[in-house]
């Protein structure tokens, strides 16, 4: 059976990736900071699907945590066939008012950690084959503080890597959802329904993951789940950056 390693697997899109892949018969390596939710999810997936689930408690902001996951990815005796870089957190959009140490941790988990894990995965997958999914955001197509900048990097790097390593049998896909019903916003201290975004602007996590996995299987470099957000991305290519930046101040993607 193929084995998938998922970061940020204890909640949100990471948990949904785990559930859908388990239902398809994949073995899993689940990575997150908290042991309790990971252990509970792992037990439920083992019981429901009879798969192997390995739990790794690691903080990907810390060098030691990243190093442990890198070592697991590089273990040729237990190869990883699919890497899903999903771990992350959000910050308020007001960069100048944020604590700079929080901004540095934000950069590490959204850029440095995926880069290091991708480097390890490419070293292990080239010639053997494999897939990498980087969970980015529609925010990566607009201008809105450091979250947007991090996701822009992830999208651009995924585009390049998908083309560069296709000949080695490795595909790299940036999955770019819009506003999605998960615990992401609540963990930022934002109350549900207080984003200023109409109901039609929200996506469901199962749909996002299903479309992301489908596009990754097709070797697409960028996946934008749902027609409504495909239209949003198309508009960002023609509207003035100042206009999209003003619109982006509402809510958080």
Image: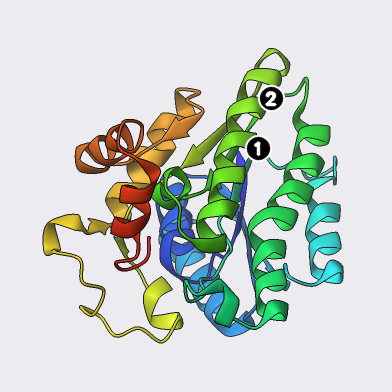
As rendered, which of 80 and 203 lies closer to the eye?
Answer: 203
44 lies left or right of 114: left
As rendered, which of 93 and 22 lies closer to the eye?
Answer: 93
Q: Is residue 171 above or below residue 15?
A: above
User: Residue placed at 28% from the left, 57% from the top?
Assistant: 247
127 lies left or right of 3: right
Residue 76 visible? The answer is yes
User: Residue placed at 64% from the left, 36% from the top?
Assistant: 157
Mark 1 and mark 2 in contact? Answer it, CB < 8 Å. Answer: yes
* Disc ID at residue 29: none
Query: How is the rendered protein coloured?
Result: rainbow
- Crowding around mark 1 (Cα neighbors within 10 Å: few <14, some 14 to 19, many 20+) is many
Q: Position of residue 224 (x, y in %)?
A: 36, 38
**Distance from Cα at disc 1 to Cα at disc 2:** 7 Å
Residue position marked by numbered label 2 in the rendering: 129
**Which quadrant is the N terminus positioned in?**
top right
190 lies left or right of 173: left
Residue 57 visible? The answer is no
Residue position marked by numbered label 1 in the rendering: 81
**Which quadrant is the C terminus positioned in?**
bottom left
Q: Is residue 86 above or below residue 55?
A: above
């Amino acid at each position: 059976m193929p084995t998938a390693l998922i970061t940020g697997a204890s909640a949100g899109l990471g948990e949904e990736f785990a559930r859908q892949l388990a239902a398809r018969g994949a073995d899993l390596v689940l990575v997150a900071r908290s042991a309790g939710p990971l252990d509970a999810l792992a037990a439920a997936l083992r019981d429901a699907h009879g798969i192997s689930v390995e739990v790794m408690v690691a903080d990907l902001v810390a060098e030691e945590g990243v190093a442990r996951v890198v070592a697991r990815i590089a273990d040729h005796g237990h190869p990883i066939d699919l890497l899903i870089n999903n771990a992350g957190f959000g910050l308020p959009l007001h960069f100048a008012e944020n604590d700079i140490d929080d901004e540095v941790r934000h950069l590490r988990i959204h850029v440095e950690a995926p880069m290091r894990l991708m480097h390890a995965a490419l070293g292990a997958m080239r010639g053997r084959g494999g897939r990498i999914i980087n969970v980015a955001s529609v925010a990566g197509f607009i201008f809105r503080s450091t979250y947007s900048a991090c996701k822009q990097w992830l999208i651009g790097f995924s585009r390049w890597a998908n083309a560069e390593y296709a000949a080695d049998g490795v595909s790299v896909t940036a999955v770019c959802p819009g506003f999605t019903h998960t615990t992401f916003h609540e963990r930022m201290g934002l109350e549900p329904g207080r984003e200023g975004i109409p109901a039609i602007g929200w996506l469901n996590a199962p749909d996002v993951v299903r479309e992301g996995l489908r596009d990754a299987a097709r070797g697409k470099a960028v996946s934008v789940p749902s027609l409504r957000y495909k239209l949003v991305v198309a508009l960002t290519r023609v509207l003035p950056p100042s206009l999209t930046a003003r619109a982006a101040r509402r809510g958080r993607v």
